[in-house]
Structures are given as structure tokens and as C-alpha cells.
RNA sequence: AGACACGUAGCUCAGUUUGGUUAGAGUACCACCUUGACAUGGUGGGGGUCGUCGGUUCAAGUCCGACCGUGUCUACCA
């Protein structure tokens, strides 16, 4: 074994073996209970970022834990087709070749996208493999695959036939750049500094009203002016008419409570075709809708001539100029507004009147709410339910149609009169609706929102609607592991669709994890230039390459310099290769249930060191194996060997329950703590002493070695779900020596820690640790060189102390660096010494010229002040009758004992202090 | 504007559900040590008025209230 653990050489090797031996695959025929996790499908043409890495690690740790715990584990893997983003990416590629999707036509374009998908899809699967994800590759799914398309079609048709899907002309969020509708959820509002323009609108008879607007150009589509009917200033205006400037149309003044008299002038222009609020007002007052926009965002022919064909921004300038010319611009005030942008294209969205398909979700949402209320599905942490309910309670119909080409084409046909027919194919349509063969029908061009297909994920991946599906075995799935950012987009919609179609919830539990941010708490994003690829932490990356990666293809090239500086500051030396296991440990240690996960490379470094520690522990055992010509056939029954087993059992029990509670951080810490602070720091050190001691016979040493190996083997299994690679590597290296006959650690049994207890022995070793630590404390504080052997005296103490000191003298002597340890009589005057206490037992280190009295004086004073503080607060407590009467008796008893102990110690320390001060 | 979350060591985070010994971990820091698993190491040590103020209680990091600060989401006044 190499002196330093090098993850590079082993990770890929083991992954390939696991995969080729089908260890990842679920077995539907198995009689074992099932455990199923559905991966939140990433975008097929994207790549995994730190958040994905985090999420995948948690899922993998869980699935490995369950697989080892005797479950038939299915981790369903797959990707979604990400309609809009993918189409954008491919269009950008085509642009480079001087092509466009319009030039290619729909069929050829879609073919191109499939080619692109094939090419980039490997990126994600490769990343997942590098992260160690034990997904069932044989069942890999894709939302656009024929099977899943079938499910999508089936769902659409059923919903249409049930009257839950309808088509209608509605105001929707229209993305001008992409020329498609978006759902409400895909809109992100951005606050910008804008203006409030005050326009005078002349009344038809005489006078005028002044309105205020942030969007002057929309006045071309105004069909009313509104005032609040309770507003005394304008009450009598209601019913009169305004001559709309520029368009020179007469429009009414109406009264509507929507108007806030406090804001602006108290008079509002109403543009029902270009504003969601105005649309509602228009509906209430039966106002006409005047649409002034083409689909590409230019002004259409329904505006006065000079404005036709203008872009919105130009139209705005022109409107302002014309109004100024007419002396109708009263004033301009700066005003903050929010402009809606598409979360994919980042272009400005316009409310636009178009025909779209909608899903009526009211009933489905009620069912979903009930399912969560009844606890059929449980959010973890629970408070995410509030977020879920808040949205579900005032859910709007879902606009599911998109005017793009990459996606599931809506299975609807129109005849020339615009009648709608819905079925799987043109033939089926004719059959179903009994249409004459000569009747011309045409399929809808629109495709479905990607989330529509993702909403079916849990049951469509298991084979629905085909009859021989796996729903019975794996559904409802056990837990969904996901981020809170897609509770609306995905989680809620899955619950609705799944309860609607198969009458059960998609998952029993929803574990919501935090969002990975950078070490400064900033969201990681391409535009901020602070993204990290998990592989860069696994394999390492030079700072130059990282800068290149971060600045490539930036939307705003100005950011380049800033990102470069920031990257150099954050990673002056680039990133070292830390390996997958260290990264996974870091992820798990951060998974505590908090909302934000600030990723700090320092943590990775610490866990990389841990892997090295584990590696070297194994290396030590290996060296001992060589030294002792192998291990024995039976394990040692020596106290330290029983003690470590018991400690391991305790750790195992904890880890099991932490996994069940999704407390990956605590599971990680328990494992870390056991391996480093118990196994390495004490057990191995104790083994060393015994191996080099002439008091132990060869057969005893071999038995100890056997115990050492079996403890290591079990610890490796305990740690495997979190650090799969290093554990498998070491486990396999020791295979000839340990009793586990399984071909791989990943399919062997998970430790439950339910073995018998050996508590008496435990306390013996804990006592040894205490004594050793207290001697080391004196050594450390007194700055005695580790190489210098010193002698220790024991005084007073009880029978157990005496027995233990006799039994474990050799261990204490070696661990504390003593040359001798002996008891002195209780009444014997000890030499001038540094001292520590353990209840009644005094541990004395004679000064003998190696300890300066001044130092010891300081040390004792420090201890006295610490203990005095505690003693004061205890005595306060114990002198309080209310405490004595109200506190639990157990606590009172403990506090009394503690107080006695401290008082005794303080007394002794005082004597000691006087002794020492004589020497000053 | 509302809802929710968060504020604990220089930094990144546990601990708060169910109040009860001396508030923990990693990292950073200081001292001593290259001892035959490991310097990606060993041993010892320093460091926290638990955001602020008030309340409940024998007892508050933990429960309640107010405030300050940070963040997220939702809804938005044209």
C-alpha cells in the first residue's frame, strides 16, 4: 500500500466492476422488500453542477444503505428533454452553421435535436458515474422516449376527455424572443428603475383626466379609464367618455374598486389585452380587447399608422414624444417597477392574448392537498408543507402549451371550422369522432410544457400505462430527494397527476435539501461566474482552466475580468484533486436540513485527510500482517478488543437511525468520530503496544490482529454508503483475511450494531483513556518533550482504580510516555508534584526538575478558577429551595454529587497550590 | 406589502422539536514533537455576553413577545 491515499487510481476501476456485475440493478422478481428512489431528472443537454452532486450523493448514500440493509433497491435514473433550453441550445448551434430551425423545417430540426441529445447525454451519465451513483442504468429513462411519450399522450387524452384540459384565448406570459407562451412559474420578476409618466386624456365634452403609467406605449390599446367609485374627486366622472389621444378613439370612464386612489393620480388607463389586472377589470366591465402586438413583439396593424411595426421600446419613445408635442405630458417621475423575464431566455415577457391549452387543476389540487394533510406524503423538514399549501390553495390553471418544436406534440386535430378532436393519431381521431375520410383535419403545432411529462415521472418510468408495469412493486416510491426550488414546478404537479391517474401518492416522503451556495453564501450561477463542476473537485483543476471554464460563453462579456479576479482570489492555486469520497463526505456533512449549504473547500480538505487516515490505518494493519505472518483464526477476547467492538456497535446503531431520519450530517460525523477518535487514536495505539510487547505470545498477537481486521471490515461496511470507493478498495485488499464472503462490500450486510453488550470492559478502557489524557495534559501544559519518559504516582483512589491500574499498567505507561507508574500510601507525603484528580484518585507527576513550579502554579490557578465558577453556580442552585422542590430528583442528585466532587477537588487543589507556592 | 427561514468560535456548520452537568465538530490559530500507519500526522492548549432587548421559569442557546440584520419565496400600485 502506498503511504498516501490516491483516489485517482481506484475509483473508476471499482465503478466499472460494480456496474458490469449488475450490482446497481433492481430485481423485480426478488422477494426482498423494495426501496425505490426516483431521480429528479436533470436536463439531458446540461451538465451536473454542485447542487446535483449534492443531491446525487444523498440519494446514493441512502440507496446503498438500504441495499446493504436487505432491500431490493431501485434507484430510477433518467433525464428530461428540457424543451425550451434544449431548443435554444440547438438553435444556437445551428446559427454557427448559418442555419436556423425555420430553414430546416420541423422534422429535420427535431432530428438535429435528437442528435444533439445523443452527443451531450453522455456528459451527465459520465458525471454520475464519477460521483459513484449506484443507479439502475438498465432502466434509464428519458421523458421523450417512445414509452414515456405514450404515457404523456394517454394522460393528455384522458384529461381532455374528462374536460380538465381545454383550449382558449387567454392572456398569457409571452416570451418575445422564443415566441412561446410560458406558465406563471416560469416568470421571474426583476426590479428596475423606471419612470411614471403622467398623461392628460381629454374628455369628450370638456376638461381632462390625468392618468399615470409605467408603460406609455400600451395606451394605444387602452379601452377605458378607471377610477375608484368611492373616490369623491372623480365620482361624477364615471360614465363620461375620454377621447384617447393618438388613437383618437372614444373610451369610457368606469368605476372599479381595483383602483387605488392613493397611487398616482387615482385615474388608471385600462389596457385589457396587455395587462393581467386590466384584463380582469375588462372582463367585469365587458370592455373590448385591443391587441396591439404581433407575436414577435412589434406593434401590429391595429395601431395608428406611424406606430405600425415599431419595436416596443421605440414605440414607447414615440408615444412620449407625440404626447409631449400635443402638450398632454404632464410630468415624469422616477419610479421603481418590476419587469417580468422568462427564466430561460431572460427576455422581457409581454402579457399577450393568444390561444393556449390549459389544465384545470382545481380538483386535482384539492386531492393533492388532502393527501399531504392526511400524511400519505410527508415533507421533511415538515415546514415545507406550508410552502406547498400556500401555492396549492390559490393555484391557477396551468398553461401547458408551448409554441416550440422540441417536445411532446399535442395530440389534437382541428378541422377547418376550428373544431377540436383529441386522440393518439389522425386515424384514431377519425375513428373516435366518426369523421368522414374526406374531411380535412390538421394536427396542433404546439407541444407540451416539459413539466407536464415530468409530472408523470414516478409512474411513467415504471411502465404505466402498459399493463405489465412495475407499479405494484415499487410504487408509491419511498422517498423523493429534491430541492425546495421545484416544489411548485415538479413536486406539487407530480402529486396531482399521480393521485389523479393511479390513485396513490407518488412518494411516501419528500426530503427537501438545501441549495448549494459558494462559501460566501452566493447562489452559484454561470452569470455570476462562481460555478464549480463536482468533477473539478474530484480531479482537481488548474486556476487557468477554471477561469476559462467560468468565462466561456458568458452572456455579459464585461463580467470576464471580474470573474477572473474573483476566481484567482478564491483559488489562487487552483483546486487540488480531492477524490470522490472526500467530496461525498463533505456533501453529507453539510446535509443538516438547513436551507442553504455554503460550500467550503476547506471542509473537503479535512475529509480528504480523513480518507488518508483511514487508508493509513489499513496500511498499518497490512504491515502487521506481514510482521506476524498473517492473522489468527479466532478473534481476541482481550478487553480492548471487546471495547472497540462495543464502541462500533454504538456507532452503528446511531448511524442507522440517522439514515432513517435523513440526518446525513450526523451519520457522517458519527462515522468520522468512530474511525478517527476511537479506532485510530486509541484502539490502534493500544494494539501497537501489544504487538511490540514481549508479554504477548504469537498466538495472542494473531488473535488481536484478527480482531483488528474484523473491526476494520465492519467499519468499512458502516462507512460504505458515504465513501464507497475507498471502502471497497481496502475491503477487497483484506478479503483473504476477513470472514466476509460476499464478492463486494456494496452487496454485503450493513452493520446494525445489535450485537451483545460488554459494558464492564467498556468502562475499563474509558478509565484508561481518562488517566492517560490527564497525564498528557500535564505533559502538554508543562511542555515536557514527548520523547522524555517521566514517572507517575497514584494515590488514594478505590479498589477498582487499583485493579484497573494493575490490569492496564502497560497500556498507561506506553500511551502516556512513562518510565514508571506506582502507587504510594494514602498517608505518605508525596514529592512536589503536578497533579490531576479523578474523583478520589490522585495522579501525580513529580516535578523532579522537569516541571517549573511557576508553570504548575499557573495551571492549578487556571483549574481552580474554572472549578470555582462551576461550584458557585452549583451552590446557588442547591441553596435554592425552589430548585430542590421543582427539578427532577435525578438532576438534583447529580448536581449534589457533582458539587461534592468539585468541592473535594477544589480543596485538594488548594493544598496543592500552597505546596507549589512554597517552591516559588 | 405578506409568508417563511436564518443570525452560535476568525470561517463553514451541528445543538433549539421534548428547557436541566462544563454549548460541540471541521477548519483556522498557539505551543511542543519529523516516535517504525499517517506531517493529508501526533500531543496539549487558547478562542463563544449563542443578533439585541424584554418576558415566562427554580433553570433559557432552547419557550413567548418586540426589535435589528440577512436571505428566500409569493403577491404586487397603473
Image (cartoon, rainbow, N blue to C red):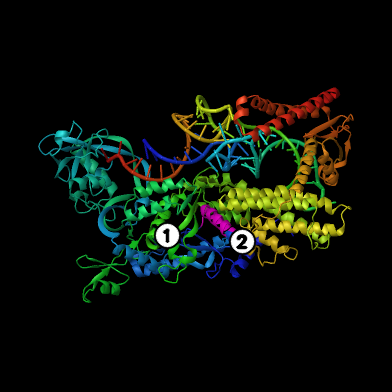
Specify the quadrant that holds the C terminus of chain A: top right
Question: Residue at label 2?
Answer: A68
Kind of element beneath mark 2: helix
Q: Nearer the viewer, residue A267 or A533?
A: A267
Question: Residue at label 1?
Answer: A504
Going from the N terminus, do you reach mark 1 or mark 2 first?
Answer: 2
Q: Is A63 in the magenta?
A: yes
| A650 with respect to A794 (left or right) | left
Which stretch is magenta? Answer: A48-65
As drawn, which residue projects farthest toward the bottom?
A437
- Relative image position of residue A639 (x, y in whole percent): 79, 51
For the residue carrying disc 2, how many other residues have a C-alpha within 10 Å: few (<14), some (14-19), or many (20+)? many
Q: Quadrant of residue B16?
A: top right
Give the alpha-carbon distance from disc 1 to disc 2, as whole Å: 28 Å
Q: Nearer the viewer, residue A20 or A749?
A: A749
Residue A522 seen from this side:
yes
| A326 with respect to A205 (left or right) | right
Q: Quadrant of residue B46?
A: top right
For mark 1, name the chain: A
Amino acid at each position: 500500500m502506498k503511504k498516501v491515499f490516491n483516489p485517482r487510481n481506484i475509483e473508476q476501476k471499482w465503478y466499472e466492476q460494480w456496474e458490469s456485475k449488475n450490482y446497481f440493478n433492481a430485481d423485480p422478481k426478488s422477494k426482498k422488500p423494495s426501496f425505490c428512489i426516483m431521480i429528479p431528472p436533470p436536463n439531458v443537454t446540461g451538465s451536473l453542477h454542485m447542487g446535483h452532486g449534492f443531491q446525487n450523493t444523498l440519494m446514493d448514500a441512502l440507496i446503498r444503505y438500504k441495499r446493504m440493509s436487505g432491500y431490493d433497491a431501485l434507484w430510477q435514473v433518467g433525464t428530461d428533454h428540457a424543451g425550451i433550453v434544449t431548443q435554444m441550445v440547438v438553435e444556437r448551434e445551428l446559427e454557427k452553421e448559418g442555419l436556423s430551425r425555420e430553414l430546416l423545417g420541423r422534422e429535420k430540426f427535431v432530428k438535429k435535436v435528437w442528435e444533439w441529445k445523443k452527443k451531450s447525454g453522455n456528459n451527465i451519465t459520465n458525471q454520475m458515474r464519477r460521483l459513484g451513483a449506484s443507479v439502475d442504468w438498465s432502466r434509464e429513462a428519458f421523458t421523450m422516449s417512445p414509452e414515456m411519450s405514450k404515457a404523456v399522450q394517454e394522460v393528455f387524452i384522458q384529461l381532455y376527455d374528462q374536460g380538465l384540459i381545454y383550449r382558449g384565448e387567454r392572456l398569457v406570459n409571452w416570451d418575445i424572443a422564443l415566441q412561446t407562451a410560458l406558465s406563471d412559474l416560469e416568470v421571474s420578476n426583476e426590479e428596475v428603475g423606471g419612470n411614471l409618466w403622467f398623461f392628460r386624456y381629454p374628455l369628450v365634452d370638456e376638461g381632462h383626466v390625468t392618468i399615470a403609467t409605467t408603460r406609455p406605449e400600451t395606451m394605444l390599446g387602452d379601452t377605458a379609464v378607471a377610477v375608484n367609485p368611492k373616490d369623491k374627486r372623480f365620482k361624477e366622472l364615471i360614465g363620461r367618455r375620454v377621447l384617447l389621444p393618438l388613437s383618437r378613439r372614444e373610451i369610457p370612464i368606469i368605476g372599479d374598486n381595483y383602483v387605488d386612489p392613493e397611487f398616482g393620480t387615482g385615474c388608471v388607463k385600462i389596457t385589457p389585452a396587455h395587462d393581467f389586472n386590466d384584463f380582469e377589470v375588462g372582463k367585469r366591465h365587458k370592455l373590448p380587447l385591443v391587441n396591439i402586438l404581433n407575436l414577435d413583439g412589434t406593434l401590429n396593424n391595429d395601431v395608428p399608422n406611424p406606430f405600425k411595426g415599431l419595436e416596443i421600446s421605440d414605440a414607447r419613445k414615440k408615444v412620449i414624444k407625440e404626447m409631449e408635442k400635443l402638450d398632454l405630458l404632464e410630468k415624469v417621475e422616477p419610479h421603481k417597477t418590476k419587469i417580468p423575464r422568462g427564466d430561460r431566455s431572460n427576455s422581457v415577457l409581454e402579457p399577450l392574448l393568444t390561444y393556449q391549452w390549459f389544465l384545470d387543476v382545481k380538483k386535482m389540487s384539492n386531492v393533492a392537498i388532502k393527501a399531504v394533510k392526511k400524511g400519505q406524503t410527508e415533507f421533511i423538514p415538515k415546514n415545507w408543507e406550508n410552502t406547498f399549501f400556500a401555492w396549492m390553495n390559490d393555484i391557477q390553471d396551468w398553461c401547458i402549451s408551448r409554441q416550440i418544436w422540441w417536445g411532446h406534440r399535442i395530440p389534437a386535430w382541428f378541422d377547418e371550422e376550428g373544431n377540436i378532436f383529441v386522440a393518439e393519431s389522425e386515424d384514431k381521431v377519425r375513428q373516435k369522432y366518426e369523421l368522414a375520410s374526406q374531411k380535412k383535419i390538421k394536427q396542433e403545432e404546439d407541444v407540451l410544457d416539459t413539466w407536464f411529462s415530468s409530472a408523470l415521472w414516478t409512474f411513467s418510468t415504471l411502465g404505466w400505462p402498459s399493463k405489465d408495469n412495475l407499479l405494484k412493486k415499487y410504487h408509491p416510491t419511498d422517498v423523493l430527494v429534491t430541492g425546495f426550488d421545484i416544489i411548485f414546478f415538479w413536486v406539487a404537479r407530480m402529486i396531482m397527476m399521480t393521485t389523479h391517474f393511479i390513485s396513490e401518492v407518488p412518494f411516501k416522503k419528500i426530503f427537501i435539501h438545501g441549495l448549494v451556495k459558494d462559501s460566501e453564501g452566493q447562489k452559484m450561477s454561470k452569470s455570476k461566474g462562481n460555478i464549480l463542476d463536482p468533477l473539478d473537485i474530484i480531479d482537481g483543476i488548474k486556476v487557468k482552466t477554471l477561469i476559462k471554464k467560468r468565462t466561456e460563453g458568458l452572456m455579459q462579456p464585461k463580467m470576464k475580468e471580474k470573474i477572473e479576479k474573483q476566481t484567482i482570489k478564491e483559488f489562487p492555486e487552483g483546486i487540488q484533486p480531492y477524490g470522490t469520497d472526500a467530496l461525498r463526505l463533505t456533501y453529507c456533512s453539510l446535509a443538516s436540513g438547513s436551507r442553504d449549504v455554503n460550500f467550503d473547500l476547506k471542509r473537503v480538505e479535512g475529509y480528504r485527510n480523513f480518507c488518508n487516515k483511514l487508508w493509513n490505518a489499513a496500511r498499518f494493519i497490512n504491515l502487521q500482517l506481514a510482521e506476524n505472518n498473517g492473522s489468527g483464526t479466532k478473534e481476541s477476547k482481550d478487553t480492548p478488543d471487546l471495547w472497540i467492538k462495543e464502541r462500533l456497535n454504538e456507532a452503528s446503531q446511531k448511524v442507522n437511525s440517522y439514515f432513517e431520519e435523513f440526518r446525513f450530517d450526523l451519520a457522517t460525523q458519527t462515522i468520522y468520530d468512530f474511525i478517527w477518535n476511537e479506532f485510530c487514536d486509541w484502539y490502534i495505539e493500544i494494539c501497537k503496544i501489544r504487538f511490540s510487547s514481549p508479554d504477548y505470545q504469537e498466538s495472542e498477537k494473531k488473535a488481536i490482529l484478527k480482531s483488528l481486521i474484523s473491526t476494520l471490515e465492519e467499519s468499512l461496511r458502516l462507512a460504505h454508503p458515504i465513501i464507497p470507493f475507498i471502502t471497497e478498495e481496502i475491503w477487497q485488499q483484506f478479503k483473504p483475511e476477513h470472514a466476509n464472503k460476499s464478492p463486494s462490500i456494496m452487496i454485503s450486510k450493513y452493520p446494525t450494531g445489535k450485537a451483545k453488550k460488554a459494558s464492564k470492559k467498556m468502562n475499563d478502557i474509558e478509565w484508561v483513556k481518562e488517566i492517560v489524557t490527564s497525564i498528557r495534559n500535564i505533559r502538554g501544559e508543562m511542555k515536557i518533550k514527548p520523547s522524555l519518559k517521566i514517572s507517575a504516582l497514584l494515590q488514594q483512589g478505590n479498589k477498582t482504580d487499583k485493579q484497573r491500574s494493575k490490569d492496564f499498567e502497560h497500556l498507561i505507561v506506553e500511551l502516556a510516555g512513562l518510565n514508571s507508574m506506582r502507587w504510594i500510601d494514602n498517608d505518605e507525603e508525596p514529592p512536589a508534584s503536578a497533579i490531576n484528580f479523578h474523583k478520589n484518585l490522585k495522579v501525580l507527576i513529580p516535578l523532579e526538575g522537569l516541571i517549573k513550579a511557576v508553570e504548575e502554579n499557573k495551571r492549578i490557578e487556571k483549574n481552580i478558577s474554572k472549578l470555582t465558577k462551576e461550584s458557585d453556580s452549583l451552590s446557588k442552585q442547591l441553596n435554592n429551595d425552589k430548585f430542590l422542590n421543582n427539578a427532577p430528583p435525578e438532576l438534583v442528585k447529580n448536581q449534589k454529587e457533582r458539587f461534592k466532587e468539585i468541592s473535594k477537588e477544589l480543596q485538594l487543589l488548594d493544598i496543592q497550590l500552597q505546596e507549589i507556592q512554597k517552591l516559588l
